[in-house]
Amino acid sequence: MNLLPIPGISGQERQVAETIRQKLLAAGCPASAIAFDKANTKTPLKGACGNLIVKLPGTHRAPRRLLMAHMDTVPVCEGTKPVVKGDVVRSGNPATGLGADDRAGCGVVLSTAIEILTRKLAHPPLTFLFAIQEEVGLWGARFVKATDLGRPKLAFNFDGGAVDKLTIGATGGERLDIVVDGIPSHAGVAPEQGVSAIAIASLAIASLVQDGWHGLVNKGGKRGTSNVGVINAGAATNVVAERAAIRAEARGHDPAFRNRIVTAIEKAFTKAVRQVKSASGKTGSVAITGRLDYEAFRLDEQEPSVVAAREALEAIGYTPRFDISNGGLDANWMAANGIPTVTLGCGQNDIHTTQEWLDLKTYDAACTVALRLATGN
């Protein structure tokens, strides 16, 4: 309830991080154990702070364990006023979401650290990571360094959903920025002298839909998704559109098939450029730049982190179920950085909407599981 109302959309997590830092200090955490990295200097947003990293030496020798959550929320959660009704927390402001994605995760990780510090519980070496800019591209997890985290051997990410769902894999995603340049002309006096960037984009998108490369993509037993999500084009109805800027994405668990989807998008736009010509035979052009948002990963069910999470859930009466996500997680980049990470839920529902709510029974269970995972008991 303390963390939920703090403003902190992606890139603006400083106040959230400072609140967490002050609570840790009040619980007896040495100031020397708390640090910020410089991940924010590498992100497109150039945010207000880096990842908040807390490292505690163990009271006994054992592999280091990591617990993590992300601090940022989506813009629809700005101005939330959390209200508790029974076992549910909702935003008392009907115009906003709650922000439990992922302040609830931060609450789980923070309360675990406070319990260990204040009760002086025995524990292995521990790292607590409060990551930045998850919602806009998993940037905090992308740029965190394993050395700064103490190279943990077991890692647990607390994010959305049910506590008994262990997410052990997720899809990979690639973003595409597509710029179509046409030739402007007066749409009433000499439309034939122009080349419409909007027409080129429309033909390309239509061909992707017709050929099965847009939306859910099933080809040769392989499965992925693609979406053209943003189009900005044109300035006036009496001008043949000179430029169209498009943002698209492709996702898939199989990197090779995802690359086939990207290639299909590129070919569709290249072909469309050739199809639209002025009366004098001139054509427009297209420039496409892509970037990998996150690579797919899949943890073995016998991975130590997965085994530990399963055993912790079973110890409090849950039957764990394994899940593979079709969305990106901080765990995607943690795996890429050499830290296999299993993701557990902590009760968030209907995230990224004004109907978002937090199930307190699930949240409480997540806190119990997190403490078991941190102490190894």
Image: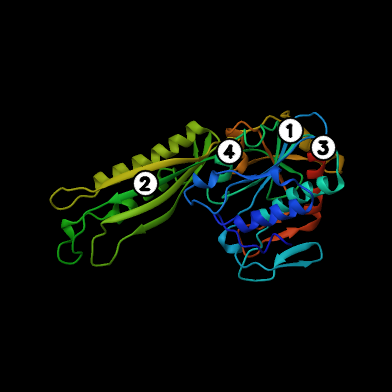
| Residue at x 82% of width, y 37% of height | 123
Pointer 3 or 1: first along the chain: 1
Circle 3 SS class: loop
- Which label lies toward us, 4 or 2? 4
The amino acid type found where label 1 is placed reads: Arg
Q: Which residue bears the numbered disc 3?
A: 123
Q: Which residue bears the numbered disc 2?
A: 207
Disc 3 versus disc 4: distance between alpha carbons? 26 Å
* Residue 305 sits in quarter: top right
Instruction: Say whether residue 110 is left or right of residue 280.
Output: right
Depth order, front residue of 362/46:
46
Disc 2 versus disc 3: distance between alpha carbons? 58 Å
| Furthest-left residue in this view | 280
Q: Which residue bears the numbered disc 4?
A: 333
Residue 313 location (% of width, % of height) = 81, 41
Which label is found at residue 300?
Answer: none
Image quarter (top left, top right, bottom left or bottom right) of the N terminus:
bottom right
Residue 43 location (% of width, % of height) = 49, 46
Disc 3 versus disc 1: distance between alpha carbons? 10 Å
Residue 54 location (% of width, % of height) = 69, 43
* Residues at marks 2 and 3 touching, judged by CB atoms closer than 8 Å: no
Pointer 3 or 4: first along the chain: 3
